[in-house]
Structures are given as C-alpha cells and as structure tokens.
Image (cartoon, coloured by chain):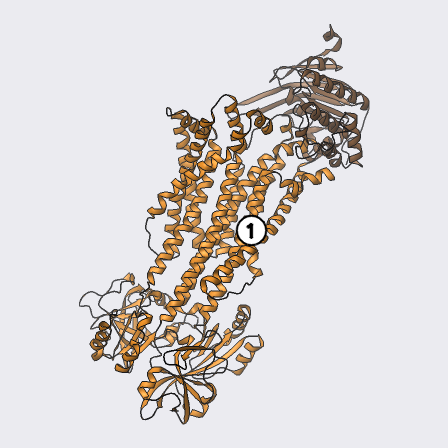
Chain colours: A orange, B brown
Amino acid sequence: MAAAKKLMSVRRDWRERDVRVVLAALIIAVATVATIALFASQLQRTLVSSASSFLAADRQLEAENGRPVPEIWITEAANLGLETGRMVEFSTMVFGSDAFQLVSIKAVSNEYPLRGDLEIQGATEGSREQVQHGPAPGEVWINPRLLRLLDIKIGDSLEVGSQNLTVSGVLLREPDGGFSLSALAPRVMMHVDDVASTGVIQEGSRVEYVYLFAGKETALDTYYQWLEPQLEPSHEWEGVRDGETFSRSLERAESFLLLGGSLAVLLAAVAVAVASRQYALSQRDTVALLKTLGLGSSGIGRLYLKRLSLWGVTGMIGGLLVALPLFWLLTRLLSEALERPVEFQLDSSALTPALLTAVVSLFAFAYPPIRRLRNVPAMRVLRSQPGETGREALPDMLIAIVAVFGLVWLYAGELSLVIALLGGLALLLGALGLLGSLLVAALRKVRGGGHSWRLALVGLYRHRRASLSQIAVFAMTLMLATTLILVRTSLLDDWQAQLPDDAPNHFLINIAPDSIDEVAGYWKERGQPLDQLYPMVRGRLTELNGQPVKEVVSKDQRVGALNRELNLTWMTALPKDNSIVEGNWFEAGQTDGVSVEAELAGKLGLALGDELTFTIGSDKVTETVTSIRTVQWDSMKPNFYMAFPPEGGLTNMPATWITSFYLPKDKKSALNEFSRRFPTVSLLEIDNIIERIQEIVRQVTQAIEAILVLILAAALVVMAAVVSATLQDRQREGALLRTLGGRQRLLVRSTMLEFALLGGFAGILGVAAAEAAVWALQFRMFEGSFKWHWHVVLPIPVISAVVLSLFGRWQLRPVLSVSPMLLLRRLE
Amino acid sequence: MQTTHYDSQRPMLSVENLTHRVSLETDTLTILKGVSLEINRGESVAIVGRSGSGKTTLLGLLAGLDTPTEGTVELDGAIISKLSEDERAQLRAHRVGFVFQSFQLLPALTALENVMLPLELAGMDAPEKRAKELLERVGLGERLAHTPRQLSGGEQQRVAIARAFASEPAIMFADEPTGNLDNRTGQEISDLLMALNQEQGTTLVMVTHDEQLAARCSRQFHIEAGELTEPVAQVELAH
C-alpha cells in the first residue's frame, strides 16, 4: 500500500503546515507539562528535604504517655528499609559546680539527626561548627545560657541524677529545636544510653519518647498504614506537613506550581484544538476524493485514527526529548539559586501527567473534528458543500470542557482552582458572545476613516466568524498568561510582605511581670524595640460544655492542642493580622468570654456559646465562646489559640510575658549580655526558620518564573496556530488586492490595523477575565484580599495589539515579496 | 467484496422518478424533478444543460456520491439508496471511475502514486505495474515521479484519466473533463478519454458544456430547471 501508506506517514504530514502546528503544539504541550511535573517533583523533594530537617527526620512518632513504644514498631520500620533513631525528652534538675538548675533534657541515639544538622560552638570563640551527631555516651552538650547559669565551662562535669557527665560541647542550634514554646528550660543534650544510669526516670515521671524515621515516601506510607491501627491517643505521628508554620509555606508553594501546571494544560489543549480543527477543515477535499475512489466511512475513520495515534507517539517522544534538557537546565538553575548541589533526579511517575496530557489532548481536542471527517459527503468532489455551521462543534466543546477540567482537576487536585478557571472562562465566553454580536452590528455601520482603516474594518467584518474565534482564543490565552503573571506577582509579594526582612526572628519567653520594663528598656537601648508583649498562662482545655474533652472529641478529631498545655493569653485589642469570623471581639470593660482560633474551633466542632473549661494549675476556669478568629500562623509573632479579655477568666492566674522582636545577625552578640542579665528569661532564636521559609519563597519564585517562560512559549504557538488558520485566505486576498492595483502601503497598513484591533479586543477581554479569575483564586485558595492590578490591566491590551499587528505584518511577507500572479497560482 | 452481480442483460444505469430537494434556511429548493432514464452497457452519454440546471447534482446521484430525496438509482444491478455508505464506497472502488473538471489529484502524491491509490484501495494486485502501464498509455511515462504542482493542466488531467481507468471500472463518470483546459488541450483530452473508453468498453456518463465533446457521445440528455427533456437522438442533433 505504498501510496496509501505515504498518505498517512508522519514524515509526509510534517510537510503540511496544519499538521506541523498540531505536532508542534503537542510537543510543546508534552514538554511543558513534563518539565513542570519533573521540576515540581524535584522542587518538592528539595523543599521537603530542607523542611525535614525541622523534624531531624522525615517523620516523628511521639509517645507522650511516658512509656516507650513496643520494640516491634521499630524493627518493622527497619524491615521496610527505613532509617530509625530514638530520643527521650524530660525535664529534671541538674547540678553544676555549686548551683541547681531545671533543664530540659534531650537524650539522643547515635543515629540522631536523620535529617539536618546540629550547630555547636567551634574550637575558637564565636565560631560555629556543623555536625551530624549528638554527644557520645558519658558526655553532654549544653545550651550557652546554662554555662553562665551554673558557672561551669567545657570539661567540667554536670550531675544528672546519679550520674556525672562531662560537658564536651556548647549546643548552639539543634535541627528540631523547633518552634515549640514548651522548651522553656535550657537544653542539655546527652546520649540515650546514659539515661537509665541517671535513675531520673521513675514510674510516673513525665517523659516523652520520640522516634525518628527517614526513608522513601512510599516506605513511610506503607509503614504508617501498618502502624496507624495500633496507635493510642497519646501517640502522635508527625510529618513535615503537620508542622504549622512550615506546612503552610509548603502548601502555598504547591499551589503556585499546580496553578502553573494547570495553565499549561489549558494552553496545550487550546493549541491542539485550534490546530486540529484547521487540519480537519483542510482535509475535507482529500476525504471526499478518497470516498469517491472507494474508501468507506469506517475506512476513513481508521485512516485518521491511525494517523492521530502516530502523532500522539511523535508528540510524546518529541515532547520528552525537549523536556529533558529543559529540566536539566532548571535543575542547574535551582542548584545555583540555592548555592548547593541539587541532584538531577528523574521521577518517572512525574511523566505520567505529560503523557496523559498528550493522550487526552489528542482524543478530546483533536479527535472530535477529525472524526467528523467521516461525514464529509463524497459529493464534495463535484461541488463545494455547505461548510460546518459550528453547531456540530457543540458536543466537541462539551467533551473538551469536561476533558480540560478533568485534566486540571486530576493534575492540580484542587477543585476550587478548577471552579475559578471555569468561572473565568465562562465569563469570557459570555462576554464574547455579547461583544461579538455588538461588534458585527457596529462594523456594518462604520463609515469614513482612511482607506486602510476601512479596509481593516471590512477585513474584520468579512472574516467575522474567524475574527471572533481568533479573539476568543487570544483572549483565553491572554487570560491564562495574565492570571499567572498576576498570581505570581501579587501572591508572592503578599507572601513576602508577611515575612519582611525585619520580621521578628527572636522570641523572649518567661518574662516575669516585674522585669518587663527592664527587658524592654534593654532592647530599646540597642535600637531593637520589642513588639507587643502578651501575658501567657499555661493551661489545658479539659471540658467542653461540662463534659470531659477526651470523651466528647473522638480520637480521629483529637488534635495536638488537646494533648499538651496551651498558651492562654488576655488582650485588649485584636492583633492586626487576626480577624474575627464569628461573634464579636471583647468590648471595652467586658470581662467574660473567650475567643477561639478558627481552625481549632472547626476541628473541635466549637460554636459560639459553647462553654470551655480550662485547668490551670489546680484551678478551673470556665468561659463561654464569644468569638472565633483566624490567626496568621506564619507571621512569626506570638499567636494564641485562646484569648481572654483583660480582667477576665485569667485574672490572678500566674502569668509570664512573651514577645518577639527583630535582631539582625550582626547584633547577635547582644544576646550574650542579655542572658547574663536576665537569666530567667528564655530566648528562642527562630532566625534560622525564617531564613528557610524565605529560601522556599525564593525557590518557588524561581520555579514560577521558569514555568512562566514555558507557558508564554506555549501561548505564542497557540497564537501562531490561530493566525495561520486564515493565512491562506489573507494571502489570497492580499494578492488579489495587489493584482487589482492596491498599493503595498495600503495593504500593510490595513492588515496591521486589522490585527491590532483583534489584539486590542482580545487583550481587553482577556485581562478582564483574568482579573475575575484572580479574584476568585485569591478568595478561594490563597485567602488574600483583592486589588485591581492597573499596572498589568492597562499595558496588556496595548502590548497584545502591537504584537499581533507585527505578527500580521510578518504573515504578509509572502504576499509582498512574490508577484501576485505567482502567489495566486500557488494558492490555487 | 463484490456487492453486485454482473448481469449483461440489464441496463448499466437505470433511474426512476428521481427527485432531489435541499432544505435552505427558509424554504426547500427542488433541484431535480422526476427524472427517469436508462443507460445501456457500453453506451456513452452526455448530460447537457445550462449552469444551475441540475446536471452536476444528477451526475452525483447517478454515481452514488449522494442519495436522492425520492426515486431510485440502480447502478450495475445495485439499488444505491439501499446500500450503506460503506457499500456504496465498495461499489465505487470496484465498478466506478471518475474524471473531474478540477482534476482532484492529491498534491502530496506523485503522478504514479495518485494512479496507484484507487488500485490499492480496491485491493488489486501489482498496483505499481498497472499504474505505470496506464501512465505510459496516457503519454506520461516520463513523468511518473512528478507531483501535480509540477505538471500542466493537461498533464494533470491525463493523470486523472489514468487514475480513473486504472481499476477497470464498468462505468465512468466525467464532470466537465475539458472545462479547465484550452481548446487544443481539451481536444487532446477528449480524444484520450474517448479512446480509453472504447478500448476498455466502459460505459461513459459525462456532464459537459463542450458541444463537440457532447456530439461525440452516442446519446445526449438535455436538462432544464431540474427536468429532463426527451433524450435527443444523435441523428437529429447532427444536422
């Protein structure tokens, strides 16, 4: 079947422009999605590995009931190929040269830390050294504050229970030092094998056993599935995603990437749909002839299905061949941005969405118009038949819409994103229908203006169907690209604005009421004034409407907040970054009620009017919920689940004060003197955490920019595809106009004007739809507030008009350079 | 698959009360009204009439490219409206040849491949050998590898004629075969068409404006506003 075979070979297809556009669109689609998916998964790994160091592992299992977990739990983890480590945490008194001090002990096994590293004081004063292990048996590393409190130095011995341990290091930072305010006493780190011989841990002691796990995500999941049914309420399984501050940053990062990915999917779909519709139109004569020569409908169907499959395979292979070097380049860029090596790792599962995109693009977008080729009447060989009215394409559009949103949903896993995009597109299409009919009506009436102006308007009117669909596609492309630009700039800016360079990076905890003024004075003198000070009372939530909480709240709903003491506070004014979602904030003089953080209220099923009972020391306090408020956990300021009014339920309870402030790196030495002067105030250094979060923001920005470049490239191909669709008509008309004596200048001007009008219309519509989509996205996804983006809204229609008019000029080249006679013959 | 039985006693083409209407946006347009005719095997017939008289529609219906609103077309023993579209395609593949005014060659294929295509579609043996023979017969033995764009109009129509006769059809339909050609080339093409028709004993049904060409057919049907005036005997036309 030499001739028939040749008719369907990809090599021959490649010579046809429409097919070239379909294949190019497909290759770009696969390449874009593959690059994004590969890079997203790489970034995810990089972020998670950097985040994991906050747990010193990938997962932690905490046993807060004072008993170690069964040994089989650990051996099972090892059997699954996971690395494991152990820690025991408890508070006790230690004895130095001649003083006692309450310390918080962390005893660690040899494997600690599985992720991240510790920082200890180096050999020379003030230098820092990073190590990946804890102290050896018989030794302890202690917090610098403790050196001063106990007046001891390196090499001295420290009495822990009945054991004497040698102080061999000064601990400056531990990876999982975290953010938890419960570690108030100075830290002593020792080896876990020494714990038993100290004799400190007795029946009933408050001890927390912590187990560390690290390894492949799949193995961790398998392990958790095995472990979960055996967990008791006092066991807490913690992953990176559960840590509040950090998980929010990661979620945001994921949302950005997924948004980019979804837009790529949409653009790919548009490109393939437009190009293959053009292809199908151009194939009608061939199909009619083949039918006349005796090929039946089913034969035609098979012929084109085979062809489509060949394109699919070509698109997949081509796309991957483009994606791999791009991904390699991005990995290099990432590595440079982070100033550390990033492993080039191909995650083959990340390729699935790319290949799926190729299959879905072909079968949901390319196949329907091509399938309709079967219905082309053979009679077309004798007489041109009425073309498609557009009505046949309606079911195609339904299939396409379902497919695109299925893809986006599958890919982003985020229904609100799908809804926002669907809403934006529906708005766009509605506006187009309305504007289209207005435009047609208006163009018919337009008179006057110069020759070229009139020709341009006539051109738009004559191709009104094509003009409308071009405006629709450009507008959609512009909407998607604009959405991404807006989301990237506005949301990243919002995010960064929440973590300004002078965001508080140190906490002072445990400030006694009578030393508040002195502490504030100390930092004011050094030019680093303290933020708002909050009183802090530690207590547990024990009853809900008179019932014990542990009975009312099921195990599944139980949250960490119930397992430990909460930090309770009272305040007059609502903090700036909090906002009331239900009820009312305390009025001046109000002394009853409690305000609950919204997420916790949701988890516990709390409503206004519920009665909460807190146990504080030996006292019980019962208050009614009067408001529910949201809290910015990533604001790096003191945040509280429960807030009382001044002179309210917490009156006369033992309170200490907490605050945060910003301290630049070069002034850190002021901390030493502070610790000496205020030995009872605890200092929490979180500058390290802030730096990591800022690092995430930087990485995500980098990734989004790379993805944006790819998406804009896809958008350009879509535009080229759409304009090429009417290229032949335009060239023929241009040639005719020249034959009839039209001057080149007239032709150039009218064409450029026509395209500028197209671009301008599309720009206005696209930007309006983008604003709508961003509005929806910001409300539903990112919890931000909406602003108009004039700096983007105004230039985009102008840029779009200019770019399209230049594109139109470029498309006109063959008409101007070749004799009209030759061109007309060639276009025949 | 052969869908018809060859029966030399029956007419090649028999049309009864053929009516064809197309619906427009507001009303219905009747293009053909109650056309009946018979064409015997080996006959050559010209359908003549003014532009818009319905002759191209009639040709399309006779060849089974379209189905009529009313009436029957029996082509080589098969009633066209009773066949499925695929069966009609099969019938065309094996029994019917076409020559068009605008040649209708596939621009991507060479002259040789264009002629081979229907042979392949009909599943015939040695398509290349047969296609070469035919191209040599129409005088294009030297231009096998040329694509349509590299050929003149007359040459393109020769390729189209070679393609039409390649599968040895029982009946040949031609739509203004000389319409796009100058007089002299048109004359050459007419000669070729008639000669091949005679050599292969094909039934020829042709729509044409070319009076000379029409005169070379054994019978003429005149069509006016969708209605057939009586078939005109060749003798009457001749004087």
Count all numbered tags in the image, as a single digit.
1
For image coordinates 44% across by 47% down, the residue present is: A480
Which residue is denoted by mark 1 in the rendering?
A30
Q: Is residue A439 above or below residue A478?
A: above
Residue B201 in the image, given as x and y percentages of width and height:
80, 22
Looking at the rendered structure, the kind of residue marked 1 is Val
Q: Is residue A698 above or below residue B109?
A: below
Residue B33 in the image, given as x and y percentages of width and height:
63, 18
Q: Quadrant of residue B188?
A: top right
For image coordinates 41% across by 26% down, the residue present is: A454
Left or right: A253 in relation to B146:
left
Q: Quadrant of the C terminus of chain A?
A: top right
**Dot 1, crowdedness within 10 Å: few (<14), some or many (≥20)?**
many
Is A621 in front, or is A515?
A: A515
Outermost residue on the left side: it is A589
Is A611 in front, or is A390?
A: A390
Residue B3 in the image, given as x and y percentages of width and height:
76, 33
Is A574 in front, or is A332?
A: A332
Outermost residue on the front side: it is A124
Q: Quadrant of the N terminus of chain A?
A: top right
For image coordinates 20% across by 79% down, the residue present is: A514
Residue B147 in the image, given as x and y percentages of width and height:
68, 32
Is B180 in front, or is A167?
A: A167
Left or right: A740 in relation to A756:
right
- In this rendering, does residue B120 appear at all? yes
- In this rendering, does residue A398 appear at all? no
Q: Is residue A723 above or below residue A59?
A: above
Q: Chain of mark 1?
A: A
Circle 1 sits in a helix, a strand or a loop, which is it?
helix
